[in-house]
Image (cartoon, rainbow, N blue to C red):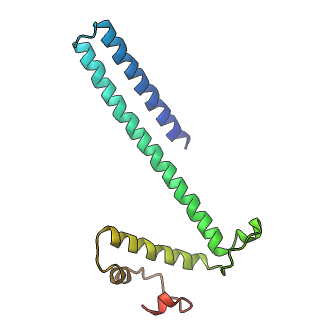
Amino acid sequence: MDNIVDSLNNAYQDFVAAAANVLETKESSAAQKTVATDAALENFKQKWELFRVACDQAEEFVESIKQRIGSECLVDEATGSMAGKSGQSTGLPPISAVRLEQMSKAVRWLVIELQHGSGTAGGAAAAHAHPSAPFDARFSEDTAQ
């Protein structure tokens, strides 16, 4: 994480310095277009693109952390490991982490199929079912397969 923050900070500092250089160069040339102002603008564009890339990388990192935290909370809630800590209960019986992972994979396949515009999402999801995810007779959606 420190590496991402440092990268973002460095890209920002370079971007701000390039912006200041454009203003200084433009001022020293009496607002006329010169080779120096063109070079300063080109440098500014490059630093802007590098800053955007650093921002995108930081955003991807934050999103991955948010997903990881969300997944951990979901597993904790589903397996009941948080019930003793918080003193709250959802009223639902806990499920195994393996079963939760199986259901999560099934949902991901459905989302992928829907994103690709498949009209037969249900059939396609069954066709893509992971072989290591056997059906569980306790769940009605598994017995229908």
Does residue 91 appear left or right of residue 135 in this picture? right
What residue is rendered at 22% in x and 14% in y? 35
Does residue 85 appear left or right of residue 115 in this picture? right
What residue is rendered at 40% in x and 81% in y? 129
Q: Where is residue 108 in the image (x, y as percent from the top left)?
A: 43, 71
Does residue 56 appear left or right of residue 82 in this picture? left
Q: Position of residue 14 (x, y in %)?
A: 42, 26
Q: Quadrant of the N terminus?
A: top right
Tag count: 0
What residue is rendered at 32% in x and 30% in y? 46
Q: Where is residue 66 in the image (x, y as percent from the top left)?
A: 54, 55
Q: Where is residue 55 in the image (x, y as percent from the top left)?
A: 43, 40
Above or below 103: residue 44? above
What residue is rendered at 45% in x and 30% in y? 12
Above or below 57: residue 101? below
The quarter of the picture where residue 16 lies is top left
**Front one among 111 and 60:** 111
Q: Quadrant of the C terminus?
A: bottom left
**Front one among 24 and 10:** 24
Above or below 88: residue 92? below
